[in-house]
Image: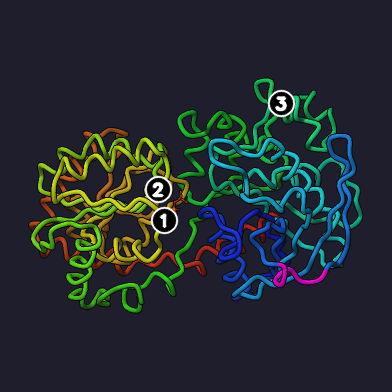
Amino acid sequence: MRNFRILMVGTELAPLVSSGGLADVLAALPAALRELGADVRIVMPAFRQIPHHQRGPVIGSVSVFLNGREQVGAIREALSPPSGVPLYLIEHEGYYGREALYGSSAHEYHDNPERFAFFCHAVLQGIPMTGWKPDVVQCHDWHTAIIPLLLKTSLAEHPFWQGTRSLFTIHNIAFQGRYSADRYGMTGLDRALFDNGTLEYEGDFNLMKGAIQYADALNTVSPRYAREIQTIEYGCGLHGLLAERSASLYGILNGVDYRVWNPAADPELPARYDHTDVAGKALCKQALQQAMRLPARPDVPLMGIVSRLYWQKGIDLMLDALPALAEMGFQIAVLGAGDHALERRLEDCIPRFPGQVGVYLGYNAALSHLVFAGSDFFLMPSRYEPCGLTQMYALAYGSIPIVRRTGGLADTVVHATDRRIRNGTATGISFVPKTSGAIIRAAAQARDLFSSPETRAAIMNTGMRQRFSWERSAREYLKLYERITS
Ligand code: ADP
C-alpha cells in the first residue's frame, strides 16, 4: 500500500468545532489513517470556536471574487488537538467569526452558499502555497461540494492539481446545499454550470448535485446507506444521479473510539464491567433509574434512548408506541434535545405513565454513558440512518439494540432470529416498517428476551464482543484511495 497524501476537507473537527457526527469522523479517521502510514492533513474554516492561540501562523493570503466583490482571507497552519494531525485553517472574519457555525436550525445564514463557496475556492488556492500536494482530496458533505467540480472544470489544467483525485463523502443526503437561483452569484461558479443543468435542480441550484457528477468517487458512511440513497425512498431527489454513478459509490462504516466507549474503563460509571463479567451493570441500571427519577427496580426491563429529537430519528413513532410499551411493563429513559414539539410530548408522558418514563432534555455527555450502561435495551427507530453511532455504543455496553433495519443500523445489528440465537450471531432486534406497531412488536420480543436470562445473556455477550474500530474503517478507505488513484 502506498503512503498516501490525503487532504480532508470539512467544516467540523472535534473537539474544536462540533455540531454532530461529522466532527467525530474528522477527528478519528485522519488519526487512524496516520497510524497506518498515510500523510493526512485537514483543512477547515477558522470558525470563531477555534481559539486564536491554536490557529498557528499565517502562511498565505487568498482572494476570491464572489457576488461582485473581492473577498480576502488567510490560510494558517496549525495542529489539530489531541492527534497532532496538521490542520490548515481558512480565515475570514466576516464569514466565520459568527456566533453559530451555520446559523440556527430554523434560519440558517442567508449567505451560507457564499461562506462555503469561499471556503472551497480558498482551499484550492491556499493548499498549493503549502507546497504539499495531496494524492486525494476527500470532501465531506455539501459545504465542500464545489471542490470536485472545480478540479474538473476551471482547474482542470492547473499544474499543481494535476493528478489529484477527489472523493466526495456523503454523511447525510438530506442536506444538499440547495438554494434559490438568485443566490447563484454567491458561489463564484461559472454561470454555464447552472444554465447547462449541471447544478440546476427544479429551478434552484444544488451544490451536492455537482459533486455527485464530478467527484472521482463517492462514498457514504455505511454500505447499506450507499445502496439506499440510490432509491426514490431515500435519495432525497438525487437517487437517479447516484444510481448512474453506482459503480463509483462505496459505503464504509464509521468506527467507534473504544478508548472513550469502554464499560471496563469508563470514568462516568458507578461500576465497571466487561463481557466476561457484567455484574457491574446492575449498579449502573440503579444509578440510571435514580438519575431519571424512576423507581430503582432491577426486575423491570429498561429501554434507553440517546438521540437528537427529530423526525429522522422516529421519536414520534416511539411516542405513539409508548402507551403499549408502558403497558408491557417497560421503563423508558430518554436523553435528548431538538424539536420543541417532540420535547413537549415527551415531558407530557412523565405524569401520564408514573414511574415508567424518565426524560432528560438537553445534551449531557456524562449521562449518555450511563444510559448505555444502565439500560437493558436501546431503542433507535430511525426513519433513515446513514451510519449511527449510538447503536454501536449500546452494543459495547451490553444494552441490546432495538433498531429499524435501515442504513448503518442494518449493517451493525444482527436481528435475533431463532437460528441466529442458536448459532450465536444475534446481537439485537430489528424491524422494517416505519410504524409504531412495528416498534411494539419488537418491544414484545425484547420483553420475552428479558424473561429468558440465558438467551439474553448470550445476545448481550455477542454484542459486547463486536468491534467496529476506526482502524478497520481506515483500512477500507486506504483501499478506496488505491482504487481511485491507480
Ligand atoms: P446523529 O449524528 O444523527 O446525531 P449518531 O448516532 O451518529 O447520530 O451520533 C449521535 C452522537 O451524539 C452520539 O455520540 C450520541 O451519544 C450523541 N448524543 C446525541 N444526543 C445526545 C444528548 N442529548 N446528550 C449526549 N449525547 C448525545
Contact flag, marks 2 and 3 (Cβ < 8 Å): no
User: Could you tell whether 432 is left or right of 107 in the image?
Assistant: left
The percent coordinates of residue 70 (x first, y second) are: 90, 43
Which residue in the structure is indicated by mark 3? 200
Q: Magenta span has 315? A: no
- Magenta residues? 52-57
Within 10 Å of disc 3 (Cα), the crowding (few <14, some 14-19, many 20+) is many
The percent coordinates of residue 207 (x first, y second) are: 69, 36
Compared with 30, 235 (above or below) is above
The residue type indicated by label 1 comes to Tyr
What residue appears at the point 31 percent right and 53 percent down from the top-left corner? 360
Q: Which mark is residue 363?
A: 1
Contact flag, marks 1 and 2 (Cβ < 8 Å): yes
Compared with 231, 268 (above or below) is below
The residue type indicated by label 2 comes to Ala
User: Is the residue indicated by label 1 positioned so its CB lies within 8 Å of ligand 1?
Assistant: yes
The image quadrant where one finds the C terminus is bottom right
What residue appears at the point 81 percent right and 48 percent down from the top-left corner? 121
